[in-house]
Every structure is written in structure tokens, then in C-alpha cells.
Amino acid sequence: MNIKFSNNNREYTIERDTYQYTLSKILTVRKGRSKGETRKSVIGHYPKEQELISALIRYEVGQSAINTTLQLADFMSMISKELSYQLRKL
């Protein structure tokens, strides 16, 4: 399973194998020979969906992208809808 989504100009991917979920941030190289290429930066590995979602929320709050409870509720709603949509496609 591979799910891609974005929030506040940040792109993420969630990959799942037999044992865990891997949460990664997609970065675009801005300088050098690889300028314009995208790379994945792993945020963490999580055995359960709930741990993955909690980690993503903590990461977004830590990046100062979520400052109010309204923004938090909107983000949680977006994550829920996106994951539900992607899982139905599988």
C-alpha cells in the first residue's frame, strides 16, 4: 500500500509492508545537480495505524503548521477522508 497526500504545501507518503507503516515527507531538491528532483525523508516507522496518525499530527504541530484547535480538527478530518479514500481504492 502506498498513499500520498499533502497539507500546507508539505507532501507525505505512507507505505505499508507486512510489519509496519512508514511515514515519509517528500522533499524537492532546491540546489545542486539534483535540483528539482524529489526525495523521501523518513519520519518514522509505526506498527499500528493509530500510532502513525498520532505521529503525523505531532509532526505537523511540531512544524508549526497547526496553531489552533480549528486547524487541528480540519487536519484530522482531511487525514481521515484521505486515508479512507485511498484504502477503498485498494
Image (spheres, rainbow, N blue to C red):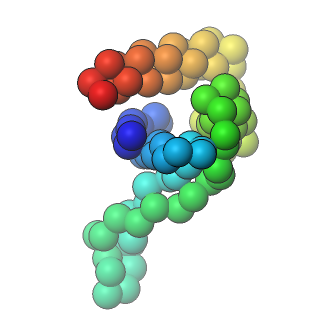
48, above or below 19, in the image: above
Which of the 4 quarters of the picture holds residue 66?
Answer: top right
The outermost residue toward the bottom is 33
Look at 52% across and 52% down and name the residue there. Answer: 24
49, above or below 88, in the image: below
Between 88 and 31, which is closer to the camera in this rendering? 88
Whether residue 82 is visible, yes or no, is no
Whether residue 84 is visible, yes or no, is yes
Q: Position of residue 32 (x, y in %)?
A: 37, 85
Q: Position of residue 19 (x, y in %)?
A: 59, 45
Q: Position of residue 3 (x, y in %)?
A: 38, 38
From the viewer's perspective, tell me whether residue 36 is left or right of residue 3: left
Look at 54% across and 22% down and name the residue there. Answer: 75
Q: Quarter holding the N terminus?
A: top left
Look at 68% across and 19% down and name the residue there. Answer: 68
Q: Quarter holding the C terminus?
A: top left
Which of the 4 quarters of the picture holds residue 54?
Answer: top right
Look at 49% across and 17% down and name the residue there. Answer: 80
Q: Position of residue 34 (x, y in %)?
A: 32, 80
Between 60 and 67, which is closer to the camera in this rendering? 60
In this figure, what is the number of numbered marks?
0
From the viewer's perspective, tell me whether residue 63 is left or right of residue 77: right
The outermost residue toward the front is 18
